[in-house]
Image: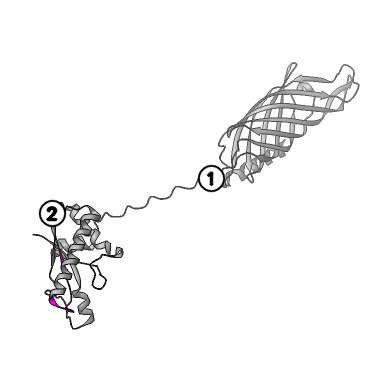
Amino acid sequence: MKNVMKLFLVIAVLVFSTTAFAQIRPGAFNIGPMFGVGVFEGNQELDEAPVLGLRAGYDFTKNWGIEATINWIPTEYEYLATPIMKDSQCTNVFNYRIEALYHFMPNSRFVPFIALGIGGQTIDYRGNLDGVKDRTRVAPDYGVGIKYFVTDDIAIRGDIRHVMAIGSIYHDLEATVGMAFYFGGKKEAPAPAPAAAAEPAPVQEVKPRVEKEILETGHVELNIEFDFDSADIRPQYESDIRDVANFMNKYPDTKIIIEGHTDAVGTAEYNQTLSELRAKSVKQYIIDKFNIDGKRLEAVGYGESKPIADNNTKDGRQRNRRVEAVLVK
């Protein structure tokens, strides 16, 4: 008995020193051996002896399960051979029962539980002793235990049972250790640790370039390039035009002048006409594409009359071929 309790304590120490993950699984079967010591109430004249047995169980939920147990206790029956001399007879005690188990902490590697069951006990005296007959009796029991999951499918366990053999009521004790091998059931991964809440980014008002420049300077040069001798707007140049429309939606009381400009290549008359066509093209694009009221827009062409760079250089001419959006003050 002392050796069994020492082993029981060792298992408990291992349990509390481990933090790995395991759990009771609904729908899982288990089976495993058990061994330990059986102690009988003194008036039965049965010696303390080893317990050997087998358990099989099924878990309906994480908390509730059922288990069947059968064990064998090879003990000695002490009797009076003569009025003054005792003798002993090899005797087999068989216990068999079904128990309901309730598991505490079913999601952990260490799972304590309580058990309550009903079964029977058979005593086989293995001899023809005068006045002593083999007997079978009802034997309800209750007890506690722990399961320690070495892996998700293998558990070491320790159990203590109080067995009440009913004839007169005899109180027996079983203390055992054993193994449980699990099959089936739904395995669940451990819940991930909650992520630390990120610091919220400071709220900043980010203004598009078009809006920023109009508010700061009253006008903005739009990034639009036209084909040679054309006023058609290519789709890749829509971005700045869309920003002008967004600006006008954001500030509904504003009016905008779309100004067209050219370089000095060609005649002044031709450049004047081309600048007007391109300004009108941008105006109409804003009206049609973004549903801006045409009364809030004006298109003006200035031809080559307002250069911002030297028309004698390639880069200068490129800068002069431009469209601007100007805020009406």
Name the secondary structure under disc 1.
loop
Q: Residue at x 13, y 57 (%)?
A: 255
Front tag of 1 and 2: 2
**In magenta segment, residue 264:** yes
Dividing the picture into quarters, in which one does residue 309 lie? bottom left
Q: Residue furthest bottom?
A: 312
Find residue 47 and report its image quarter.
Answer: top right
Residue matched to label 2: 295
Residue that label 1 marks: 190
Residue at 23% from the left image edge and 72% from the top image edge: 229
The part of the chain drawn in magenta is 258-268
Give the residue type that dot 2 points to: Lys
Question: In the image, 227: left or right of 215?
Answer: right
Residue 153 covered by magenta stretch:
no
| Mark 2 crowd level (few <14, some 14–19, many ≥20, 10 Å Cα) | few
The answer to whether residue 298 is above or below residue 322 is above
**Picture coordinates of residue 48, whole percent (x, y):** 77, 30
